[in-house]
Amino acid sequence: MSGNGSISQEGNGKVSRVIRMGTRKSQLARIQTDSVAGRLKELYPDIHLEIVAMSTIGDKILDTALSKIGEKSLFTKELENALERNEVDIVVHSLKDLPTSLPPGFTIGAILQRENPHDAVVLHPKNAGLTLDSLPEKSVIGTSSLRRAAQLKKRFPQLEFENIRGNLNTRLKKLDEKDDYAAIILAAAGLKRMGWDSRISQILGPEDCMYAVGQGALAVEVRAQDKDILEMVSVLCHPDTVLQCISERAFLKQLEGGCSVPVAVHTEVKGSMLYLTGAVYSLDGADCLKDTMQTVVEIDNKVSESAQECVHVGVTANCVSSSALEAAEKLGMDLANALLNKGAKDILTTARKLNDAR
Ligand code: DPM
């Protein structure tokens, strides 16, 4: 950041930089930003952090399903504008809301340790004790995620699925105070961060519903050229999460999928092996292409020195060796290519067309 606005003179004569963190105004965004601010304060007790809250298009258009709004960088654009204008230096996002290609000039400088990546069932209080298996036939489940609806329609054909929008607070209110939904599906990570663990009645494993690319992980977006800030946030990186999320993002990118296609993943790191399962679905879940691949990732190999060679699917990471990052990215691309060879393009094109026509 340039200009005097960013420099503060401390009483002891030491000059230190004020670091501004941009955040959306929703409670979840604030909590996520505060948690990263807390980590930075622990690591760098002398820094001056300021939090700047703003609303984004995604927060303003609450009644349209996410998948129907064309804008890819729905929740991120205004925040990136503020980054570009040097009004803020750091933006914290849910990684799953960040497109696989960031606009030029921006990079993800850190991906933090993943929270539970799975989806969770939140029941209307009157259904306490039930599960997706035991809910009455034709019970209405609220979700506007094409990914969740596709998988769950196939797995639980007796249930019905309807859109529900709004931030987490709005959705819980819509669930509890009306009789429209028997249950809603939300990411466990968001519920936990909000302190609503007690509302989770069921965690959906990969047999029921695989998660979204990047789900449950926080990402720190910065200006790609801001070396000081990049170095500062890089210590927040969690190596296993970085490798998992790079393979997931490479998979989605190679499929040319965005946040509006039914694509799901599941990744695991076991020792020096990285496993990636990925799938694409038709809107009703009837067509599904799914496969698993693995690769060796030598996490502790020599860490790359040059910043250039360590950018992968928008992520600048120097906490992991460049060979491991390359292997993770290649894994995602290879798995996508395997599914593309089996006809994934047709499934996704049809899903996109049908969704646009709805
Ligand atoms: C994206 C999707 C959703 C969000 C699509 C998907 C859910 C939309 C909906 C890309 N972003 O998951 O298939 O349910 O209508 C979002 C949430 C979080 C980040 C909330 C949620 C919190 C969890 C996290 C919205 N983005 O999914 O319940 O940090 O991953």
Image (cartoon, rainbow, N blue to C red):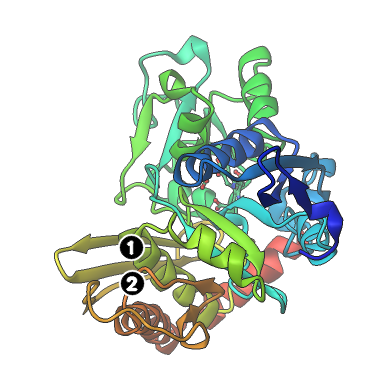
Vertical position of residue 236 compared to residue 274: above or below: above
Looking at the image, can residue 244 be seen? Answer: yes
> Which residue is rendered at x = 77% and y = 42% of the image?
52
Q: Are marks 2 and 1 in contact (CB under 8 Å)?
A: yes
Left or right of 122 on screen, residue 132: left
Residue 288 visible? The answer is no
Q: CA distance from mark 2 to mark 1?
A: 6 Å
* Mark 1 vs ligand 1: CB below 8 Å: no
The residue that appears at 47% across and 58% down in the rendered structure is 111
Res 239 label: 1
Q: Residue at x 42, y 13 (%)?
A: 128
Q: Secondary structure at mark 2?
A: loop
Q: Residue at x 51, y 41 (%)?
A: 45
Of the numbered discs 2 and 1, the one sitting upstream in the chain is 1
Task: Provide the residue designation for mark 2.
Answer: 320
Q: What's the amino acid at mark 2?
A: Val
- On the image, the x and y values in percent for residue 229 come to 60, 62
- In the rendered image, which quarter is residue 32 located in? top right
Residue situated in front as seen by the camera: 28 or 287: 28
Q: Secondary structure at mark 1?
A: helix
Q: Amino acid at mark 1?
A: Pro
Viewer-proximal residue among 116 and 67: 116
